[in-house]
Amino acid sequence: MKIQQRGSCSERNCSVNEKEIVIRCEGLTRDYQGARALDGLNLQINAGEIFAYVGPYGAGKTTTVRILAGLLKATSGEASICGLDVTGQSHQLKSMIAYMPESFGVYDHMRVWEYLDFFGAACNIPRKKRGERIDYVLTLTGSEPIRESFVETLCHDAKQQIGIARTLLHDPKVLLLDEPLRGLAPAGRVQMRKLLRRLADEGKTLLVSSHVLPELVTICDSVGIIEKGKLQVAGPAKEVLAGIRQDRLIELKVLSGLQEAAAAIERSDSAGEPDRSDAGANLLRFSFTGDDQTLSALLDELIKGGAKVITMREVPVDLQEACTTAGGVTSQQGGPGPRRRS
């Protein structure tokens, strides 16, 4: 997997002041005993972005991340980070990147600070600086209150915080995070998303994998959807999501006045025919092409027409919908332009 250095990233420093390409994959393929786990992946991720790498279990996400982390060799193709080959120049990359697997081992009878100190020493961080870095990552991840706790006693959410803290010890420029939000409680997911967004805003480049698309939609800059080893679509988040769903899907729940609400929706030039399949639960769903102001005006009309509205919400794109429709979009960063569905 020999690849020449490209862009302005040097071996000693990966600048994030410009929108340069930091992660690049070209024709990346990986076979396991005759089965193809990754099939000709072409991908580019810009500096300072959160790239949401989304797909069902077994789609090829972990294989990709492990190749980029230098832990797995590709069968064919090329991959580089900051212009450095992830296989041939993995030693130079160690100080630039950090990898957090979906699950990672912990050491019994070690307090949190001792656990971080151990890995800080493994990263060759000098002892004096190591203490400063431990203080910083504990504060950054909101883990200072559990500094003296034994790692094996922590709940899953706290272990994920410590996992992120561990990856940040040597101040990497690129973070490869495999399912960091999986299994977190609602409050933990919110906290993790805020942390990831903060890291990107501070200039780090993040590849974050997930099997749940809505988890990352609100914070990612770009998104890629992979299924059965093939990248279905990749690009700026807004463009990809717009290509998957041309119209907004709105769900309306009323206490009463369902028929009046349906009639008002039918009169709207921006709304499609309401779906009454859940009318028994006082629910209507309809496609909507207008903006937020138009949607607000429709809500006013519903209320004036006698509908007692409980909720009106936009239904987010789910992973199943994304995977079944993304194949018709095929927009890839650095690749061909979008092909819209007819």
Image: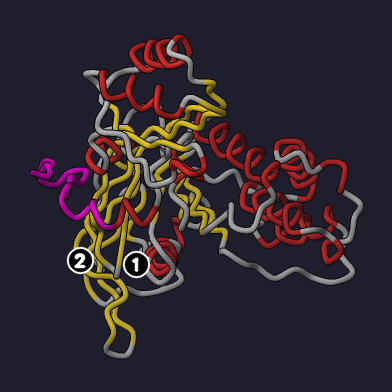
Residue at image position (32%, 75%) is 37
SS type, badge 1: loop
* Residue 13 visible in the current orientation: no
Q: Quarter of the image containing the C terminus? A: top left
Residue nearest the viewer, comparing 246 with 238: 246
Q: In the rendered view, would you say 265 is above or below 99?
A: above
Magenta range: 324-342
Image-quadrant location for residue 193:
top right
The residue tagged 1 is 88
For badge 1, the amino acid type reads Gly
Residue nearest the viewer, comparing 258 with 335: 258
Decide if residue 120 is on the left or right side of residue 91: right
SS type, badge 2: strand
Residue 337 in percent (x, y) is at 11, 41
Q: In the rendered view, would you say 196 is above or below 119?
A: above
Q: Quarter of the image containing the N terminus? A: bottom left
Residue 150 in percent (x, y) is at 88, 61
Image-quadrant location for residue 98:
bottom right
Residue nearest the viewer, comparing 135 with 36: 36
Residue 337 part of the magenta-drawn span: yes
* Majority secondary structure in the magenta region: loop
Of the image marks 1 and 2, the number of the one nearer the N terminus: 2
* Number of residue marks: 2
For badge 2, the amino acid type reads Gly
Residue at image position (47%, 53%) is 212
Decide if residue 229 is on the left or right side of residue 66: left
The residue tagged 2 is 40
* Residue 187 visible in the current orientation: yes
Residue 116 part of the magenta-drawn span: no
